[in-house]
Amino acid sequence: MNLTDPIFSDANAAREHLEALHWPDGAFCPHCGSVDRITRMKGKSTRPGVHKCNACTKFFTVTVGTIFEDSKIPLNKWLLAFRLMSSSKKGISAHQMGRSLGITYKSAWFLCHRIRLSMTPANPASLGGPDKVVEADETYVGGKAKNRAFRSPRAKQPVVALVEREGHVRSFHVANVTAKQLRPLILTHVLPTSYLMTDESGVYTRVGREFHGHGTVNHSASEYVTTGGFKHSNTVENFFSIFKRGVIGTYHHMSEAHLARYTAEFDFRYNHRKVNDAERADAALLGAAGKRLTYRRANAA
C-alpha cells in the first residue's frame, strides 16, 4: 500500500481520482442525468471540480449523490480511509481510524459506517448454479454471559453465511436460526440448481430438498470432511474464522443495530480477495455512488 500516493495527501488529486472512477466517459449531471450539456466551471472564485448542467441549470461535483456529499472531511482523508478499511483483513476500529486520519472518534465512527454502506452491493447476483456448491452455516456474535455488563440476559446475535466454493459469500444478521427463517433467505440468494452443503442441523433439512442436491457433515460426531473431500463445510467455516477474528481482535463488540453493516464489510473483502488493495479500494469507492447516510439515521439504526 503506497501511502505516499498524492491521492492520500492532496484533496484535488483525490477528487480527480474519484472523477476518473465515477465518470470514465465524462461528467454527467446527478440531478437530471444529462451527459452532453455539461460545463466545467473555471475561475479564481470557483472551487475546483464544480460543473454546471446547462439542461437543468444546476451545479454539481463528483461528490453529489454519494456518501461524500456535504462532508467536512477532506477527500484525500476519505480515500485513505477507504484504502485502510479495504486492506485490513480483520477490519479497523473507529478509534484507530480516527488516530490515523487525525479526526475525532465521532467523525471516524460515522465515516466507517458510510464506507460499510458503500461496500454493500445494491443488486447482488445469486450464488451457485449448475455444478456449483454453496455452503451454508451459522455463527453467533456476542460475549459470554458472565462478561456482560450487569449480567444482561441479552442473547447472542445469529449470523448466517452462504458461501459459494471458489466464489462469493453473502452473510446476514437474522432474528432466529429456524427453518422458517432460513428457508426464504437461502432460496432468495442461492440458485436451486446448486448443490447445498450444510452441517447436520435440522433447520436445513427441508430447504435442502429444493436444491439439485443436499449434502451434510455430522459435526457432532466429529465428522468434518468425508472420503474424497467433497462433503464439507470448511469454506464457510474459514469465512467465519476471519469474521470472528475481527469481532474478537478488532471490534470487540458489534451492536445488534449495526451488525448487518459489519457483515457487509467482511463480505466485501472476501468477495474481492483476488485483487490487490488498490483495486479493492477502488471497487468500494465505486459503491459510494447513489448512497447517502445521515448521522441521525446511522446513530438511530
Image (cartoon, rainbow, N blue to C red):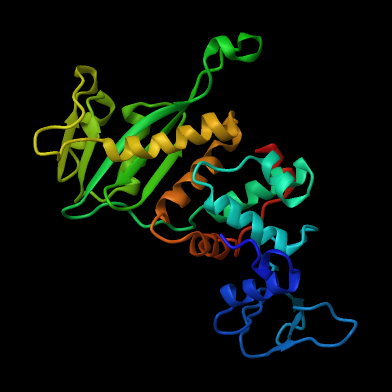
126 and 90: which one is in front?
A: 90
In this rendered view, identify the residue nearer to me: 137 or 182: 137
* Number of dots carrying numbers: 0
Tell me the quarter of the image containing the N terminus.
Answer: bottom right
Is residue 116 visible to us here?
yes
Q: Could you tell me which residue is drawn at 9 percent across and 39 percent down?
A: 228
Q: Residue at x 53, y 20 (%)?
A: 143
> Taking 71 as reference, is 245 left or right?
left
Quadrant position of the C terminus in the picture: top right
In the picture, residue 290 is in which quadrant? bottom right
At a point 65% along the width and 14% down the height, the residue shown is 149
Q: Residue furthest right?
A: 45
Q: Is residue 205 above or below residue 239?
A: above
Direction from residue 182 to residue 173 in the image, left or right: right
Instruction: Tell me: 281 left or right of 172.
Output: right
Q: Nearer the viewer, residue 25 or 125?
A: 25
Q: Residue at x 90, y 82 (%)?
A: 45
**Where in the figure is residue 53, as x and y percent of width and height?**
72, 84
Q: Position of residue 128 (x, y in %)?
A: 26, 52
Residue 67 visible in the picture: no
Q: Residue furthest left?
A: 227
**Left or right of residue 147, residue 227 in this image:** left
| Residue 112 position within the rendered picture, expressed as x and y whole percent measured from the top left | 65, 47
Q: Is residue 197 above or below residue 108?
A: above
Towards the viewer: 50 or 177:
50
Residue 98 vs 31, above or below: the answer is: above
Instruction: Name the spot of residue 113 as percent of width and height, x first.
Output: 63, 46
